[in-house]
């Protein structure tokens, strides 16, 4: 069996420490494994958000005020987001059927890594041309959510940010 010599700080005083080759290789592999695991787990590039940026869970329901005039539907409301680090976006798709189905896909995009821990009401205003009897459905980050729509009889519908300020 081959012996390998490992010289430590005591080598200057003439003291040597011997280790079996297999033990030396095992020790190096163990240290490399610990270093790799620590680097992987503590790296900010591992795909997870920083600890102060919580993931955005879909709400149980999204509420909106609805009005219809001259072939145009208008929906407005707000969605609570966990921090100002997120920006709310939406896209509408009208499916050809009778009555038409309008699918509103809400998505949330992270725009900053570190923000104050305060819930933010993100406003939305949607206008879409469809028949008066159109049906509305919503998703939030790809997951279906209840879309609670309340009819508004007096027009115009203001953007939610305008309703708050005046």
Image: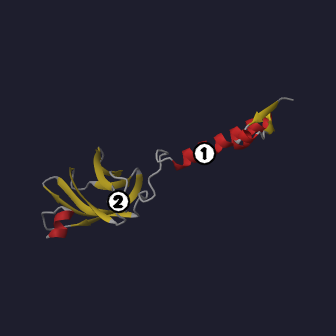
Nearest the eye: 36 or 159 = 36
Q: Alpha carbon of mark 1 to alpha carbon of mark 2: how far?
A: 29 Å
Count neighbours of disc 2 (C-alpha within 10 A) and say few if under 14, some if 14 to 19, many if 20 or more: some
Q: Residue at x 12, y 63 (%)?
A: 156
Quadrant where the N terminus sits is: top right
Residue 121 percent location from the top left of the image: 29, 64
Which numbered disc covers residue 37? 1
Q: Secondary structure at mark 2?
A: loop
Looking at the image, residue 139 lies above or below residue 158: above
Which numbered disc covers residue 116? none
In the image, farthest residue toward the front:
13
Which numbered disc covers residue 115? 2
Give the total number of marks visible in the rendering: 2
Quadrant where the C terminus sits is: bottom left
In the image, farthest residue toward the top:
2
Residue 162 percent location from the top left of the image: 16, 65
Label 1 vs 2, first from the N-terminus: 1
Residue 45 percent location from the top left of the image: 46, 44
Looking at the image, residue 5 lies above or below residue 132: above
């Amino acid at each position: 069996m081959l012996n390998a010599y490992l010289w430590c700080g005591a080598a200057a005083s003439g003291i040597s420490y011997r280790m079996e080759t297999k033990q030396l290789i095992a020790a190096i592999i163990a240290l490399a494994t610990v270093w790799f695991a620590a680097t992987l787990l503590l790296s900010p590039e591992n795909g997870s958000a920083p600890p102060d940026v919580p993931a955005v869970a879909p709400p149980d329901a999204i509420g909106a005020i609805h009005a219809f005039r001259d072939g145009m539907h208008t929906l407005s409301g707000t969605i609570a987001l966990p921090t100002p680090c997120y920006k709310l976006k939406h896209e509408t798709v009208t499916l050809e059927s009778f009555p038409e189905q309008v699918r509103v896909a809400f998505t949330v995009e992270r725009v900053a890594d570190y923000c104050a821990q305060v819930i933010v009401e993100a406003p939305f205003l949607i206008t879409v041309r469809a028949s008066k009897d159109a049906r509305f459905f919503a998703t939030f980050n790809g997951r279906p959510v209840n879309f609670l729509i309340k009819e508004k009889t007096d027009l115009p519908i203001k953007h939610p940010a305008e309703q708050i300020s005046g």
